[in-house]
Image (tube, rainbow, N blue to C red):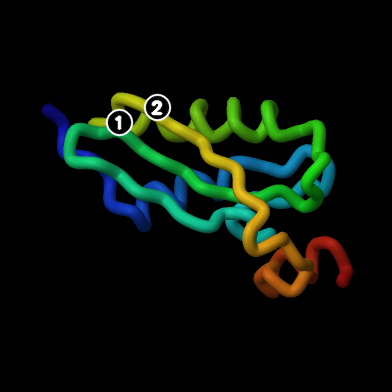
């Protein structure tokens, strides 16, 4: 069995997942709440969206699978949405604020 990536490696991979509406990655936006990787390679990603009714959740979920499954040792990806706490623009990092001119 392959050695699974570290949490930090998984987070770096998730920087490739772009919010289609804002054009900024989910990590920089502060949408990513948690990443857990089990020893057998199952990944659980918990995130929120900019609004609870965002119709783009399935696109973001597919992007997450597309960047996680090719990583060595990853066997399964589960994406969980939460709105607790709700997303707030203050959760963005400085790069995202600059890119969005906020």
Residue 97: x and y in percent read 78, 69
Q: Which residue is rendered at x = 87% and y = 71% of the image?
A: 102
Q: Is residue 3 above or below residue 15?
A: above
Query: Which residue is situated farthest in the front direction here?
Result: 84
Q: Which residue is rendered at x = 27% and y = 45% of the image?
A: 5
Q: Residues within 10 Å of mark 1 (few under 14, many from 20)?
A: many
Q: Is residue 53 left or right of residue 42?
A: right
Q: Which residue is rendered at x = 67% and y = 53% of the image?
A: 83
Residue 100: x and y in percent read 84, 62
Q: Quadrant of the N terminus?
A: top left
Residue 27: x and y in percent read 59, 56
**If you read the primary sequence from the N terminus, does the residue marked by circle 2 or circle 1 appear first?**
2
Q: Is residue 36 above or below residue 53?
A: below
Return the residue at label 1: 74
Q: CA distance from mark 2 to mark 1?
A: 6 Å
Q: Is residue 16 above or below residue 90?
A: above
Residue 72 visible in image: no
Picture disc at residue 60: none
Disc 1 on helix, strand or loop? Answer: loop
Q: Is residue 52 left or right of residue 81?
A: right
Q: Which residue is rendered at x = 71% and y = 48% of the image?
A: 49
Return the residue at label 2: 69
């Amino acid at each position: 069995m392959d050695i699974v990536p570290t949490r930090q490696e998984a987070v770096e991979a998730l920087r490739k997942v772009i919010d289609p509406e804002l054009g900024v990655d989910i990590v920089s936006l502060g949408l990513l709440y948690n990443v857990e990787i089990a020893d057998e390679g199952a990944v659980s990603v918990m995130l929120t969206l900019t609004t609870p009714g965002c119709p783009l959740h399935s696109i973001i979920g597919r992007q997450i699978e597309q960047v996680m499954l090719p990583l060595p040792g990853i066997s399964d990806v589960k994406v969980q949405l939460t709105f607790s706490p709700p997303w707030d623009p203050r959760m963005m990092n400085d790069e995202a604020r600059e890119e969005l001119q906020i």
